């Protein structure tokens, strides 16, 4: 016993850090004390944690999903990342990262799996809502600010998904075939900025294949570029289940396999002992893990005492981010803002009027304690002075109205009780005897930490629920199940839904007529593989008069606002959208309202582009509200009524048809490969090159006031040294009578470039807030490296001499972009 005590004392002494001690020396000392087996054990996780080594006091690193808030118990639901991209606000991105990190600390976690910096290349992408947009510079600047905010609270940020992970269709196996120049100039700048400017602690390797090799064992991606070229000294974590081999993964860059060590724990020892894997490679992985833990103080007391309630403070921050990201796309005859002093009746129409579409689906979905819909907000703000009517018009087939316990019956221990009997198994196949049998009052579970019970765990389990459904009214219903991973539904012995596959949260429904008082035998089977687990059982009753009620409400109102768009069941991790427009029933609703001939405002919720020129044309005003987080309703209401002046700018281009986009000829795949033949020309670059007219351009957004840019000056007409900086100044004036914000966007163009270059591309931007009549001088700077391209032949970045143009304005394609010329003449 005495020997054990002495060992612990010595170990603790070894890890006491002082200002005078060198972290690298301490790390090396700890690594030298680890056995080979202990080192290898550190290379595999346990669900959402790394493994500790208690003998030496090495702590576990506790991870949690992001980036819209921490997915661990109830938390603040911030707007989708695409909405944060639409703010074009660096400070706000920092504040959101910091706010989320405070909740991470409060929940006893150490690492946030965020930000997601994959670009919006194809509008179908299921996780476009988790991205910052289509441009590498906008994404790099905002995500780096977010990283700095997260890590300011001593929480690890994890930039993901590295790399070229731009679609969910076949995401586990798709091979992204891409040119190195395109890779480095378009799809890697945000990762590079996160590493070199944000000092990000961790990088997540993607599921997909890149140029023939899985990203989690891609030597060129993980070692050559990330660790060697960029000097990344943190650790690489695999996406959950993204590792496919032992030897390749061990040698070529992943440092910890999640959610377990299926490959890096179980078979590495033999490879090291046989000399197939040098032990120094293992030492490097372990060294990176321990160094990050020391850098962020994980060896110290991690108890967290905030000076303020992070959740209370984050309510306002979530509201600010939602409001700042809303984009006013159209405002015919200044129909907005609504003057609530001059109207008597407002009709809030559509399936998103009384439901707040806080976020998309999948691992980013936050379990929030409250959510404010537009109807909630209007009632709380104006219910005492206005008549507010709300009609959905359509019933979204993906809505899961959980069936309450009074309609569910089961026999348990000889008694008839409310609910279903749940049989829980410690495997994914409902095999053997159940580990746990209990009554669940309703099927509405969101297991993130802890799992269904201590005896079951978090992952690799299955459940069979049995019982009777007894409706109290007759009519046409749709019974539905939503699940993260596999689900089957049986009604009276007939299997009507069979989705026994790994997937993010998705909905399936089955239509049938139910009779009041009749008993229906129900069996629901579910399995969970890895990550968060969700399953729900609900119903929708058909209402043939929904459309008529909505039209009647619109007729009776002075102002009509239609809330349409998508939800977490349409845009989610795990699958791409099949089309680029609104669901058919919503289009029918809009068509019926158009026939009234009344002015109407359209508010849309979505992540990826909605391509529907006729819908935009028929609306008198259009607000792009994204997935706005838990405070979405309040933010939307305040924009609509002018309490807040809209200042959002589009982070991507909205075309007139699917064929307008650069990925049209190359998506979804060809023989399990996705060819990036659009090269440098994605987003607005493609629209510029091919002179395609968009519905709404990248960087575009209207305001309730007006701005003027003038007195544009360059600090020099020539740059002669790599160290030179060209400063661009202008005066920005708010010429209207409402306070607001404008985004000054600086693009560069090239005269007679020696290699293929875009017509123009974004280099710098600044969001500026001005009172009515206020003028401010704005400065933006570029250096030669900002204008460089990557030369595959020279294997380096090159800035060519020649004539360049500065283009300054408030969107990528406004007609009066201010143009200035300068020259680069590097000796």
Image (cartoon, rainbow, N blue to C red):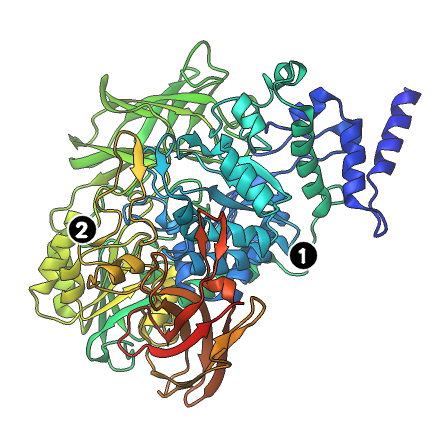
- Outermost residue, left side: 595
Residue 682 can be seen, yes or no:
yes
Q: Residue 686 — which label? A: none
Cα gap from disc 1 to disc 2, whole angstroms: 51 Å
Dividing the picture into quadrants, the one containing residue 686 is bottom left
Residue 85 vs 295, above or below: the answer is below
Residue 380 can be seen, yes or no:
no
Residue 33 location, x and y as percent? 80, 27
Residue 271 vs 583, above or below: the answer is above
- Outermost residue, front side: 827
Secondary structure type for disc 1: loop
Q: Which residue is mark 1?
A: 306
Q: Quadrant for the C terminus, please.
A: bottom right
Residue 695 location, x and y as percent? 21, 64
- Outermost residue, top side: 432
In-image side of 145 versus 489 (left or right): right
Secondary structure type for disc 2: helix
Residue 134 vs 408, above or below: the answer is below
- Residues 111 and 554: in front is 111
Near mark 2 (Cα within 10 A), the count class, few <14, some 14-19 or many ≥20, is few
- Residues 292 and 753: in front is 753
Mark 1 and mark 2 lie on one chain; the one further toward the N terminus is 1
Residue at the image position 71 percent from the left and 41 percent from the top: 291
Q: Which residue is mark 2?
A: 659
Residue 744 location, x and y as percent? 41, 74
Whether tag 1 and tag 2 are in contact, CB under 8 A, the answer is: no
Residue 149 location, x and y as percent? 58, 58
- Residues 643 and 298: in front is 298
Please state which of the two labelled residues, at mark 1 or mark 2, is closer to the viewer.
2
Q: Quadrant for the N terminus, please.
A: top right
- Residues 255 and 175: in front is 175
In-image side of 774 versus 193 (left or right): left
């Amino acid at each position: 016993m005495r020997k054990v005590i002495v060992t612990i004392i010595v170990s603790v002494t070894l890890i006491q850090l002082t200002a005078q001690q060198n972290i690298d020396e301490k790390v090396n000392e700890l690594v030298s004390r680890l056995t080979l087996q202990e080192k290898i054990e550190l290379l595999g996780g346990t669900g959402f944690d790394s493994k500790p080594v208690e003998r030496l006091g090495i702590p576990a690193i506790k991870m949690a999903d992001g980036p819209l808030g921490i997915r661990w118990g109830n938390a603040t639901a911030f707007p989708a990342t695409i909405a944060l991209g639409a703010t074009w606000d660096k400070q706000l991105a920092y504040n959101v990262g910091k706010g989320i990190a405070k909740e991470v600390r409060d929940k006893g976690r150490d690492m946030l799996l965020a930000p997601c910096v994959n670009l919006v290349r194809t509008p179908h992408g299921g996780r476009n809502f988790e991205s910052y947009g289509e441009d590498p510079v906008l994404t790099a600047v905002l995500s780096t600010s977010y990283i700095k905010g997260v890590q300011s609270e001593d929480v690890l940020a994890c930039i993901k998904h590295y790399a070229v992970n731009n679609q969910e269709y076949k995401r586990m196996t798709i091979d992204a075939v891409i040119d190195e120049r395109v890779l480095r100039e378009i799809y890697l700048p945000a990762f590079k900025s996160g590493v070199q400017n944000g000092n990000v602690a961790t990088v997540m390797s993607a599921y997909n294949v890149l140029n023939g090799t899985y990203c989690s064992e891609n030597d060129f991606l993980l070692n050559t570029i990330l660790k060697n070229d960029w000097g990344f000294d943190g650790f690489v974590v695999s996406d959950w289940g993204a590792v496919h081999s032992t030897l390749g993964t061990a040698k070529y860059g992943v440092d910890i396999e999640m959610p377990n060590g299926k490959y890096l724990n179980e078979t590495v020892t033999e490879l090291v002992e046989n000399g197939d894997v040098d032990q120094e490679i293992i030492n490097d992985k372990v060294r990176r893990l321990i160094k990050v833990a020391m850098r962020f103080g994980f060896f110290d007391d991690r108890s967290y005492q905030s000076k303020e309630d992070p959740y209370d403070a984050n309510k306002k921050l979530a509201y600010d981010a939602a409001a700042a990201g809303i984009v006013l796309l159209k405002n015919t005859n200044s129909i907005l803002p609504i003057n609530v002093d001059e109207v008597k009746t407002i009709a809030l129409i559509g399936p998103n009027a009384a439901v707040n579409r806080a976020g998309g689906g999948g691992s980013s979905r936050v379990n929030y304690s409250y959510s404010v819909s537009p109807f909630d907000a209007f009632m709380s703000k104006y219910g005492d002075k206005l008549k507010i009517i709300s009609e959905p018009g359509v019933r979204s087939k993906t809505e899961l109205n959980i069936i309450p316990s009074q309609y569910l019956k089961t026999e348990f221990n000889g008694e008839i009780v409310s609910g279903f009997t749940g049989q829980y198994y410690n495997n994914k196949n409902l095999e053997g005897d159940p580990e746990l049998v209990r009554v669940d009052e309703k099927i509405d579970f969101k297991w993130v930490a802890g799992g269904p019970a201590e005896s079951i765990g978090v992952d690799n389990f299955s459940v069979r629920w049995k019982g009777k459904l007894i409706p109290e009214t007759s009519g046409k219903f749709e019974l539905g199940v939503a699940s993260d991973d596999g689900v089957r539904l049986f009604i009276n012995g007939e299997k009507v839904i069979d989705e026994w596959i790994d997937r993010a949260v998705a909905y399936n429904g089955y239509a049938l007529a139910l009779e009041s008082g009749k008993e229906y035998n129900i069996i629901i089977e579910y399995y969970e593989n890895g990550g968060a687990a969700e399953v729900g059982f609900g119903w929708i009753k058909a209402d043939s008069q929904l459309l008529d009620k909505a039209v009647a409400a619109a007729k009776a109102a002075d102002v009509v606002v239609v809330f349409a768009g998508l939800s977490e069941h349409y845009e989610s991790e795990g699958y791409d959208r099949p089309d680029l427009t609104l669901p058919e029933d919503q289009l029918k609703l809009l068509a019926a309202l158009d026939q009234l001939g009344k002015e109407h405002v359209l508010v849309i919720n979505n992540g990826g582009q909605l391509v529907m020129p006729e819908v935009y044309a028929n609306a008198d005003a259009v607000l792009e509200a994204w997935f706005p987080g838990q405070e979405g309703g309040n933010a939307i209401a305040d924009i609509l009524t002018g309490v807040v002046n809209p200042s959002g700018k589009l982070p991507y281009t909205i075309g007139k048809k699917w064929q307008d986009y650069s990925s049209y000829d190359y998506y979804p795949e060809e023989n399990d490969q996705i060819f990036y033949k659009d090269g440098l020309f994605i987003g607005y670059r493609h629209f510029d090159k091919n002179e395609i007219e968009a519905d709404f351009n990248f960087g575009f957004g209207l305001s309730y006031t007006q701005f003027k840019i003038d007195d544009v000056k360059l600090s020099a007409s020539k740059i002669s040294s790599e160290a030179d900086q060209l400063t661009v100044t202008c005066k920005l004036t708010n010429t209207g009578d409402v306070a607001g914000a404008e985004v000054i966007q600086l693009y560069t163009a090239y005269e007679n470039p020696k290699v293929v270059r875009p017509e123009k591309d974004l280099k710098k931007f600044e969001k500026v807030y001005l009172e009515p009549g206020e003028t401010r001088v704005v400065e933006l700077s570029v250096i030669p490296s900002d204008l460089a391209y990557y030369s595959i032949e020279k294997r380096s970045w090159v800035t060519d001499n020649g004539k360049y143009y500065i283009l300054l304005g408030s969107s990528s394609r406004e007609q009066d972009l201010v143009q200035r010329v300068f020259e680069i003449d590097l000796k």
